[in-house]
Image (cartoon, rainbow, N blue to C red):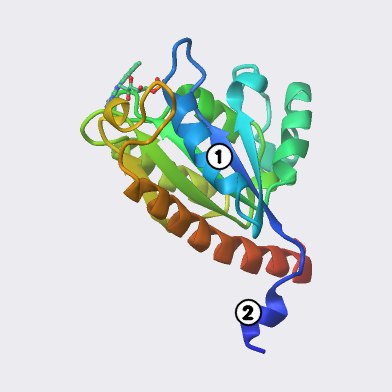
Amino acid sequence: MNELDTLSTPDRVRIQIILGSTREGRFGDRVANWFYALAVEREDLIAELIDLRDWPLPFFNEPKSPITGHYAPEARTWAAKIAEGDGYVFITPEYNFGYPAVLKNALDHIYHEWNNKPAAFVSYGGGAGGSRAVQQLRQVVVELQMAPIRAGIVIPLARRLIDESGAITDESYDGRAHALLDQLLWWARVLKAARAEHPK
Ligand SMILES: Cc1cc2nc3c(=O)[nH]c(=O)nc-3n(C[C@H](O)[C@H](O)[C@H](O)COP(=O)(O)O)c2cc1C
């Protein structure tokens, strides 16, 4: 038995797929539904799709940082939901070279529930496929004590890739999505065991 076997727990890790676009007429549903359909078929994880439309948090305006443990009353159920996750896949578009404000707001509202868990990114947009948004997100999640993983999916000109029925026209993306999940799972398992062994 190697060291990782002793660290791993028999239960499946829970991966939360967080859709970071909420605007009317968004394209993000197609990306999220494609990725979730693929993840939910896997037997080595529990996949959950979290649509920020279902979590209409107020604009962050609290007197204290969530790092202190002070959360807005409206953020407490959000915190409980995120606490269930062992790892996260953020699905993000690119708005003016950045990621949506609604996603930043959801990240900022809580702190401890994100800590010591891995984060992966699936981005989409124009020619750069949302890659500039992801570069920003990588910096932000480090401050939330998450571990951003190397594997990521960048979808340039996404409307050409996922048609209106939700079908993906380049099947190589399925393989990339599984490779991302494989890497995320490694981190999720290791960090889950480490959190159990070394509670904060
Ligand atoms: C406010 C705004 C700014 C945008 N800025 C960029 C950008 O900087 N780079 C890019 O590739 N696409 C940009 N786009 C195009 C979006 O990436 C594209 O519309 C995408 O579908 C948005 O995701 P959504 O439909 O899920 O909200 C922008 C779109 C909006 C609405």
Tell me where residue 50 appears, x and y as whole percent. 63, 32
Q: Is residue 63 visible?
A: yes
Quarter in which the N terminus is drawn: bottom right
Report the amino acid beneath label 1. Answer: Tyr
Residue at 65% over, 55% down: 45
Rounded to the nearest angstrom, the CA distance separating label 1 from label 2 is 27 Å
The reply, left or right, for residue 125 in relation to residue 164 is left
Residue at 57% over, 36% down: 18
The reply, left or right, for residue 33 in relation to residue 77 is left
Q: Could you say whether the residue bearing mark 1 is in a helix, strand or loop?
A: helix
Q: Could you say whether the residue bearing mark 2 is in a helix, strand or loop?
A: helix
Tell me where residue 197 appears, x and y as whole percent. 77, 71
Tell me where residue 118 appears, x and y as whole percent. 56, 55
| Residue sitting farthest toward the left | 127
In-front residue for pair 94/1: 1
Q: Which mark is residue 36?
A: 1
Q: Which mark is residue 4?
A: 2
